[in-house]
Image: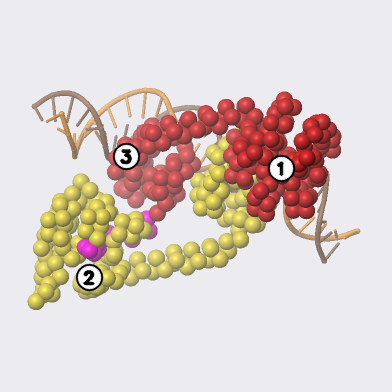
Chain colours: A red, B yellow, C brown, D orange
DNA sequence: TGAAAAATACCACCCGGCTGGTATATGGTT
DNA sequence: AACCATATACCAGCCGGGTGGTATTTTTCA
């Protein structure tokens, strides 16, 4: 009978033990390696070539995401599930970027881990319900944003000009000087940029502009 | 005899007249059209298909750079020379991006304009000496920057983590909360980022990170 | 020609980023 | 043992960005 071969990586021994017991209560799973930090996880993965790697996100020496990246690079056939306490958006996105196929919160139901491993082994993805919800919201927001992606065309040429100068990291004062305008006028144009683009800080404007190709 | 056919665009009549007289003292040049604003310049260019378009940068209705963009898009065989009072770096770079082949300061020697037109007509580029100097400095700086491009590797993993969170537009307070650290600690890490990367503001850090591929 | 959009200008207030200056604990290196 | 890098933490002060509120002039377009 062909078991799904699993690597467990978590710096907490108790957690690893618990996971192992949980998994071994299902005969179709077999834990073939354990690791207590990121670097070990990569080594163990390369040594045992597991079907699925379950990685805690917060590990010493090399965090779960960096470990995922390396494992994914070395062993593209090993599916990766990230375990995390946080549903923080940044972490999830980085995990996905690192090649993770699943992202599970630690307070998930036991059955979720079983489902997750089976899913990623089958080439599907698996996320905790909270994560799914968040990602969907993201996606919808993305669509909405793309939809109203004429936003840039809403800008007047003066506003575009000022946006470019902002990307060049010029201060309001400098822009006023370059364009021979009052500081207050620049402030007003910036307000209008904020309103039209629904972005309300310089960093946001810069990210927007860069992604828009106003890179210069 | 085949003349080089030229379009002149400048909102100051006196300037246009002077340029025309200057050019017509050279029999190999022929001014075939004039325009007193950007929109006219584009129209005239499309109507007369000149070999070279000489555009003032500061024109009403449509500035020289935007006009250059449109002319370049419609008539790729028309070489464009930008005339400007300013040697501001941003303008020069935008002019180049808009497809200009030459950039002349208005206080250039008369001969420079002749040389510039002949050069761009021959498919070469031409810049005022001041501009050349500036661009070279830029280039050198660029090389130097690229050379010491290990800068990112100087960062500790904590610093990289914080840099990523900054790109996600998290405030110091939010980062402190996410990482369970004091606000002051985040400030210290940011100082270190500033020092190591020689960048001293959030917008600079963000541009750096984005260009570095920390896009998420 | 008259209304709407764009560009210009000013003031006051708040908040957060940025800096100078300091300090402690820890872990690895020579 | 001495040293350096890293990570943590605190305080005070400055400055610039962001915003609420207002107003005039110029341009554009129906």
Label 1 crowd (10 A; few <14 / some 14-19 / many >=20): many
Please tell me in which quadrant of the rendered image residue A123 appears.
top right
Which circle, 2 or 1, is nearer the viewer? 1
Please give the residue where the numbered disc 3 appears in the rendered image. A153
What segment is highlighted magenta in the picture? B77-90
Please give the residue where the numbered disc 1 appears in the rendered image. A52
Residue found 56% across the figure and 66% down from its top: B147
Label 3 crowd (10 A; few <14 / some 14-19 / many >=20): few
Chain on which label 2 sits: B
Label 2 crowd (10 A; few <14 / some 14-19 / many >=20): some
Quarter placement of the C terminus of chain A: bottom left
- Residue A107: % across, % down: 72, 27
Q: Is residue B184 visible in the rendered structure shown here?
A: no
Vertical order, A51 against A109 (above or below): below
- Residue B27: % across, % down: 10, 75
Of C11 and A39, the residue lying toward us: A39
Q: Dot 1 lies on which element?
A: strand
Separation (CA) of disc 3 from disc 1: 47 Å
Q: Dot 2 lies on which element?
A: helix
Chain on which label 3 sits: A
Residues under numbered marks 3 and 1 in contact, where contact means CB atoms less than 8 Å apart: no
């Amino acid at each position: 009978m062909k078991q799904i071969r699993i690597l467990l990586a978590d710096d907490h021994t108790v957690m690893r033990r618990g996971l192992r017991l949980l998994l071994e209560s299902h005969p179709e799973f077999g834990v073939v390696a354990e690791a207590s930090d990121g670097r070990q996880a990569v080594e163990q993965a390369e040594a045992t070539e597991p079907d699925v790697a379950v990685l805690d996100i917060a590990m010493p020496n090399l965090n779960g995401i960096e470990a995922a990246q390396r494992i994914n690079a070395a062993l593209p056939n090993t599916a990766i599930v990230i375990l995390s306490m946080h549903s923080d958006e940044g972490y999830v996105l980085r995990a996905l970027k690192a090649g993770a196929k699943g992202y599970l919160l630690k307070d998930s139901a036991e059955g979720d881990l079983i489902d997750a491993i089976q899913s990623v082994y089958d080439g599907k993805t698996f996320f905790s319900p909270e994560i799914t919800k968040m990602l969907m919201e993201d996606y919808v927001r993305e669509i909405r944003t793309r939809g109203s992606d004429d936003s840039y065309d809403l800008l007047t040429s003066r506003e575009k000009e000022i946006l470019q100068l902002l990307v060049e990291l010029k201060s309001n004062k400098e822009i006023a000087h370059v364009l021979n305008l009052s500081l207050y006028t620049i402030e007003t144009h910036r307000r209008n940029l904020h309103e039209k683009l629904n972005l309300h800080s310089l960093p946001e404007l810069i990210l927007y502009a860069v992604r828009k190709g106003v890179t210069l």
